């Protein structure tokens, strides 16, 4: 009985803050990160189609299953759930600090150093596949990439076409609707706002290998 009592005491003290992002946008961001600062050789040099095809490697983006698992250990009333980009929740940092009772205005804020690269830059970088490089060498490549002029680069960070985006959202529609009703008291978890351009700005093999990668190497050699 003492063990059961201890578990109940721990459950009573635990609070969970969880921030959800629309699955298509999450997958784009996660792909960006896997290429920009890679740790998994399977994805470090992959294109977006291969990455999306392996989306089952990321089971946590089924938010109904994820929250159901959390509820096995934490009472519903102690789970703080927000959707990034919805209901005026634009910053998970500010919201989390508020949840913890901390005034974010009292903290010194720094610029986001982990911003995603544009789709054109990622499409070049994936062909270099920097996973084998040590940290300083990776930074040199990223620095040189930021200095070259890329004709295809519009600053767009989208990788998915509208059809691909809708397919992903359809796969999660039912589970997302269940989360919406249980945690938010509404029918839809995410709005239909399209916050990204729908036409990816990608780079051809010829331009990547014959033009831009040599320019990157030249920039590095000049340092």
Image (cartoon, grey):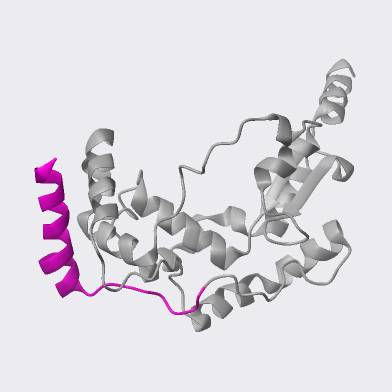
Residue appearing at x 85%, y 39% in the figure = 78
Q: Specify the quadrant that holds the C terminus.
A: top left
Does residue 2 lie above or below 159 as drawn?
above
Q: Main SS of the magenta segment? A: helix
Q: Range of the magenta residues? A: 197-223
Q: Residue furthest top?
A: 2
Quadrant in which residue 21 is drawn: bottom right
50 up-or-down from 162: above or below = above
Residue sticking out furthest to the bottom: 163
Q: Give 208 or 14, whichever is nearer the viewer.
A: 208
Residue 132 pos. (x, y %): 22, 42
User: Quadrant location of residue 210?
Assistant: bottom left
Residue at the (70%, 42%) spot, across then down = 94
**Front residue (pair 220, 179):** 220
Which residue is at the front of the view, 126 or 66?
Answer: 126
User: How many dots with numbers?
Assistant: 0
Residue found 28% across the figure and 35% down from its top: 135
Q: Would you place residue 111 above or below residue 13 in this image?
A: below
**Is residue 203 located in the magenta-colored stretch of the structure?**
yes
Residue closer to the observer: 45 or 98: 98
Looking at the image, residue 118 sits to the left or right of residue 4; the answer is: left
x and y percentages locating residue 56 in the rendered image: 51, 61
Screen quadrant of the N terminus = top right
């Amino acid at each position: 009985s003492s063990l059961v009592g201890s578990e109940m005491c721990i459950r009573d003290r635990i609070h969970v803050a969880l921030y959800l992002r629309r699955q298509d946008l999450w997958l784009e961001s996660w792909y960006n990160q896997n290429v920009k600062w890679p740790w998994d050789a399977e994805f470090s040099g992959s294109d977006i189609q291969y990455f999306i095809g392996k989306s089952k490697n990321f089971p946590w983006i089924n938010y109904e299953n994820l929250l159901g698992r959390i509820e096995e250990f934490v009472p519903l009333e102690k789970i703080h759930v927000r959707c990034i980009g919805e209901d005026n929740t634009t910053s998970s940092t500010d919201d989390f600090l508020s949840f913890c009772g901390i005034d974010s205005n009292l903290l010194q804020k720094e610029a986001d150093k982990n911003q995603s690269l544009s789709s054109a830059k990622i499409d070049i970088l994936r062909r270099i596949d920097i996973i084998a490089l040590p940290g300083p060498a990776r930074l040199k490549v990223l620095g040189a990439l930021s200095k070259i002029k890329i004709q295809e680069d519009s600053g767009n960070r989208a990788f998915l076409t509208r059809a691909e985006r809708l397919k992903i959202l359809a796969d999660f529609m039912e589970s997302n609707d269940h989360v919406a009703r249980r945690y938010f008291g509404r029918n839809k978890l995410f709005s239909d706002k399209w916050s990204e351009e729908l036409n990816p700005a990608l780079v051809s093999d010829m331009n990547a290998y014959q033009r831009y990668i040599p320019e990157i190497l030249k920039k590095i050699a000049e340092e």
